[in-house]
Image (spheres, helix red, strand yellow):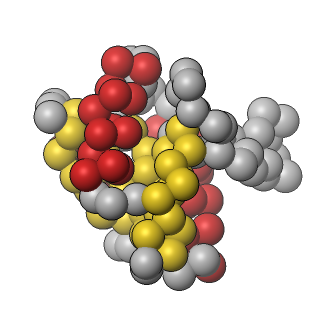
Amino acid sequence: MVKEPYFPQAIQWAQKRGLNDIKANWEDYETPSQFSKKDEETPFIPDITGSSTGGKVYVEIALKTGDIERSVSHWKLISTLASMKGGKFFLLAPKGHKTFVSRMLEKYRMHNAQVVDLQ
């Protein structure tokens, strides 16, 4: 499933949350910094980043996927970055995806990521 239709809602969520310096991997926004892992050729770009008084905030639009390993790998990377920068990591799950995302977080013990309904 493609993330693009969910970007307007996700950016609106970030704005309502009071994030500053919002960057998004979407049209008309500055692209967030990309990250590379040793075992992957293609760099990874977070969906949305911003800052708040608590530090750096990372936001991913989380969808059911056939490539669970890749998604979880990216989520772990972002989770680590958020922890290192004293920030937070949110997974915005559209209707029908929240249960899947929550199960993956539990299965892979990613307790510092917070799942949010994206409606």
Seen at 35% across and 72% down, the residue is 111
Q: Quadrant of the N terminus?
A: top left
How many numbered discs?
Answer: 0
Q: Position of residue 16 (x, y in %)?
A: 25, 52
Seen at 44% across and 45% down, the residue is 60
Q: Position of residue 4 (x, y in %)?
A: 43, 20
Seen at 84% across and 35% down, the residue is 41
Residue 24: which quarter of the image? Answer: top right
Residue 88: which quarter of the image? Answer: bottom left
107 or 62: which is nearer to us?
62
57 or 51: which is nearer to us?
51
Q: Position of residue 100 (x, y in %)?
A: 25, 42
Left or right? Give the position of 21 relative to 97: right
Left or right? Give the position of 37 relative to 58: right
Seen at 50% across and 65% down, the residue is 51
Residue 76: which quarter of the image? Answer: bottom right
Left or right? Give the position of 79 relative to 112: right
Q: Position of residue 72 (x, y in %)?
A: 50, 49
Q: Is residue 57 at all visible to an observer of this figure?
A: yes
Q: Quadrant of the C terminus?
A: top left
17 or 47: which is nearer to us?
17
In this rendering, is residue 117 above or below 17? above
Q: Is residue 108 at all visible to an observer of this figure?
A: no
